[in-house]
Amino acid sequence: MLSRHQRMLLQCAPISEARVNDRDMRVALHRGRKTEEFANQQNFDRALAELVRSIPIPQELKEWVPPEAFLSPPPRSWKRLVRNPAILATGIAIAVIAVVAISHLIDRMNQFPGEPTARRLLTLASSTHSMLLDPVKTNAGSLGDLFFMKHRLAHYDVPEEFADLQTIGTRVFDDEEGQRVAQVWVVEKRMQFFLFPAERDAKTGAIQHFNDWRFIDQEGWSGVVKEQNGVCFMATLRGRQKDLAPYVAKPKE
Amino acid sequence: MLADARKAQEIFHAMLRAAAQHSADGEPPIDRLWFFREARERCLEASGQGLQAEEIDLEKEEIGAAAPQQIAKLEATQLAIWISAAPDPQRSALALFYLDEFDQAELLAITESKPAELAKLLSNGRHEFQAWLNATVPLAET
């Protein structure tokens, strides 16, 4: 049974099969061929087209300049454009530049004040053994008082995200730039914490603050850094960022 | 479209001149359909200066299985006269359709009609031509 749309298509079905370019038309033709009405129509159309072809064309017209001479060149399809070596090379170059630019942009977005120090300490973390530290078994959150009372380090507080973790040991030392650094070893995942002074502006001496957690990776170690009250806290472990991400995913209630 | 070889030839030459002029102006025709659109417009313009076909309801008959035999007895000029006497846009639709040069989309573009409209023009044309054919070449003669 032919639909109304298919009947409409059959009424203007091209006489030659070569002129059928449309899927709907092909389906309509497939169905229509089973009907006598359409068979009569096709025979009728073919006979008329044959009659039209029999009309003699004057020799003068046959010898006229072919219409292609006047036509504008066909627009280049994107497939042909892509195959052009010059365009292909340009495309690859643009893609490489774009990748490098995006990579730089991502790097810059991840940069934060104090990152060089954080990277140095990340290297240190990979070579530190717990034996170097003074044994202290308590909650990491309570170390702030110890650092203040014993070493006069103000605001060297472990953020609440890591405050409940049990410590193994701590130490305080001066790094190569003479900054006081506190190092803490905790039981969970053999993580290490570092607390160090936040970077200051070279001209004004003002602390360069940043609010959120920043991730760094280096030689199989990952760190997550946050600045608070002029002191940077960094939690590190051997692994990937995703191992640290759950700790800083949302603030503790 | 015109059933007049001399007029058709004049239009053909005028169309060629127009195409050459467009090319010289740096705006060559964008595709081959341009020639057919141009030819159609010029034919309509030329025929508009003469007698006009009236839109009347012609007799229609079902297309018969013997139609090809009836058509075989016709002269091409008889068909040309019949088509040129049809009112436009039916005339354009029939003339371009039986050239057997276009797919449906191209035909719609040149005739500037919608699919349902084109289907109706062609269908009516066939049935009207069959009625004329039956009158001109009766079945008993085939």
Image (cartoon, coloured by chain):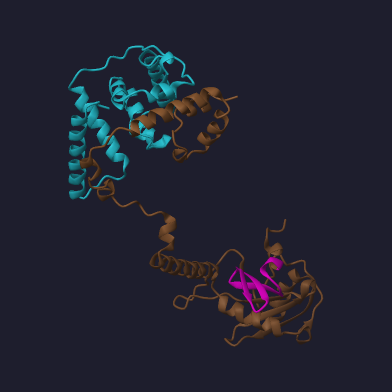
Chain colours: A brown, B cyan
Of A17 and B56, the residue lying toward us? A17
**Residue A122 position (above or below residue A93):** below
> Does the magenta portion include B47?
no
Quarter occupied by the N terminus of chain A: top right
Residue B3 seen in render? yes
Q: For residue A221, which quarter of the picture?
A: bottom right
Residue sitting at 46 percent across and 21 percent down? B66
Find residue A177 and report its horizontal and vertical position in percent: 57, 86
Find residue A141 and report its horizontal and vertical position in percent: 74, 69
Q: For residue A189, which quarter of the picture?
A: bottom right
Residue sitting at 73 percent across and 77 percent down? A184
**Residue A143 position (above or below residue B132):** below
Residue sitting at 59 percent across and 88 percent down? A176
Of A19 and A166, the residue lying toward us? A19
**Residue A95 position (above or below residue A199):** above
Q: For residue A174, which quarter of the picture?
A: bottom right
Quarter occupied by the C terminus of chain A: bottom right
In the displayed image of the protein, which residue is found farthest to the front? Answer: B141
Q: Which residues are drawn in magenta?
A: A215-243
Find residue B97 and report its horizontal and vertical position in percent: 37, 31
Left or right: where does residue A107 sit relative to residue B115?
A: right
